[in-house]
Image (cartoon, rainbow, N blue to C red):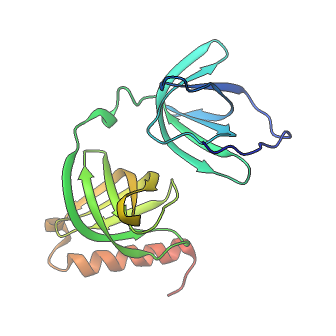
Amino acid sequence: MTTVKEPASISGPAVTLYSMAPDDPPRPCVMLGLAEGKLHVRSSQWIEPSSRIRAQFEHHSFTGEVQYCTRKDTWFRICIDLLAEHDQRREPRMAVHQKGAVTTLSNTHPLSVPGMLLDLAIAGMRIELPHEVEPGTMMYIETATALIAGEVRHCRKGSEGNFEAGVAVTDVLPAIQLGAAAPGMARSICRKLGRAISGKRR
């Protein structure tokens, strides 16, 4: 477990997180916001994404699933999906294992790298790629049959030195809709959009 010292000058509503795992101590946190079924908190400790959590705020108690945990300078920002028990996270996923080109709209890594779509559901997918991606990053994967876009929820070290990203799907465009020139055209569009967002000209 990683722990960092939290600045004493920052304050907010107190929230205590209780893990569903046995023998895991309570974690005092500070609420950053609550909107659209998602609770955002600041913590001095890392919490593993996909962990089941109960959040206690004054006399109110909520249960949910850690969507992502991002390290800041001296603390961690944690997003908890309070609707996790009732939403599409419980839907079955289909194993795919289809190779493709992964385009990440980030200025910290190459825009387009080889990757693999590991599994896919109606609202989520899991992608294997060669580098770590920050939660909240927009990502595209172009396979032989579709162009799928989404937002990274969590990313962790996988097998053989690769990383596995859990992605909330926002758009799916089948190859039949892209037309015969789909591969090159889609990649060109994604790269141009990525360069525009990252501030690169070429």
Q: What residue do we see at 39% from left, 51% from top?
A: 166
Above or below, comparing residue 18 to residue 122 in the picture: above
- Relative depth, front residue between 119 and 124: 119
Residue 149 in the figure: left or right of residue 1: left
Above or below, comparing residue 186 to residue 155 in the picture: below
Q: What residue do we see at 27% from left, 60% from top?
A: 117
Residue 136 in the figure: left or right of residue 178: right
Above or below, comparing residue 20 to residue 100 in the picture: above
Determine the image quadrant of residue 173. bottom left
Determine the image quadrant of residue 164. bottom left
- Relative depth, front residue between 177 and 118: 118
Please identify the residue farthest to the top as the structure is shown: 59
Q: Position of residue 98 (x, y in %)?
A: 20, 63
Q: Position of residue 104 (x, y in %)?
A: 43, 68
Q: Position of residue 157 (x, y in %)?
A: 44, 57
Residue 69 in the figure: left or right of residue 73: left
Above or below, comparing residue 199 to residue 94 in the picture: below
Q: Position of residue 116 (x, y in %)?
A: 28, 64
